[in-house]
Image (spheres, rainbow, N blue to C red):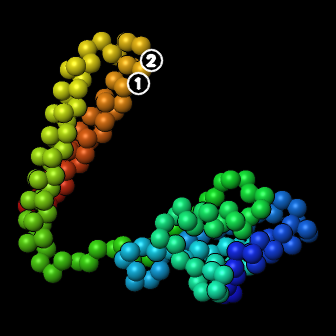
Amino acid sequence: MARKTMRQLTKLLRDHRVTTPGAQATFRAAAVPGDKGLKFKLFVTINAVEYEAASNYGKVQTFSDMDAAVKYLAGCVETSTGTYSIPIETGVVLIKSIPADLVAWAASEVERLGVRKLAQQAIVNKLEDQLDLMAGWDTGNALQQAKYAEVVAQEDCVLGDIAAIDAEIARLTP
């Protein structure tokens, strides 16, 4: 696969658009194998040919976040629509290793989840304290209603997380 700098990719797409007006490049990101810091390489496909994004020095360009990757892509596409669909392939980089002793792992996981559940319950308690102070806000002015709806949504989300924790503890407890 050929490496291309941003300027080369721009020229390739510009040249392709001469014969195919409105042609678009497609993109994908792939995690750098073995890099647990989750850096990505970027690939750009123009006219059915895939190119690997390179720096101005000709080295494979890696990105530590998708913001930087999208900025690079925006530089390649002069007449972009502003919408970038980028499949992200991580392969096995993020897969957790399998514990040697599953029973001991399950016991420590139940303990860890118990601690997390207590922390989540403390968050629910704080949200409930806020809701107690918001009496009438559900029918108040627009700002009050928005704040009330946000706190209710947060509480629902955290309660859902507590239910997921309970389900995971039940699954791990024989």
Q: Which residue is mark 1?
A: 146
Q: Are marks 1 and 2 in contact (CB under 8 Å)?
A: yes
Task: Identify the residue at horizontal 23%, vertical 48% (top origin).
Answer: 164
Task: Identify the residue at horizontal 70%, vertical 82% (top origin).
Answer: 4
Task: Identify the residue at horizontal 53%, vertical 77% (top origin).
Answer: 62
Q: CA distance from mark 1 to mark 2?
A: 6 Å
Viewer-proximal residue among 62 and 167: 62
Where is residue 84? Give x, y as percent: 64, 58
Where is residue 21? Give x, y as percent: 88, 61
Quadrant where the C terminus is found in the figure: bottom left
Viewer-proximal residue among 18 and 61: 61
Where is 66 relative to 55, above or below?
above
| Left or right, 120 with reference to 34 | left
Q: Which residue is mark 2?
A: 142
**Residue 7 placement: quadrant:** bottom right
Q: Amino acid at mark 2?
A: Ala
Viewer-proximal residue among 112 and 7: 7
Q: Dot 1: within a 10 Å radius of its alpha carbon, few (fewer than 14), some, or many (20 or more) residues?
A: some
Q: Residue lying at the far right in this picture: please name it.
A: 19
Residue 148 shows in the view: yes
Quadrant where the N terminus is found in the figure: bottom right
Q: Amino acid at mark 1?
A: Ala
Where is 83 relative to 59, above or below?
above
Where is residue 50? Give x, y as percent: 69, 78
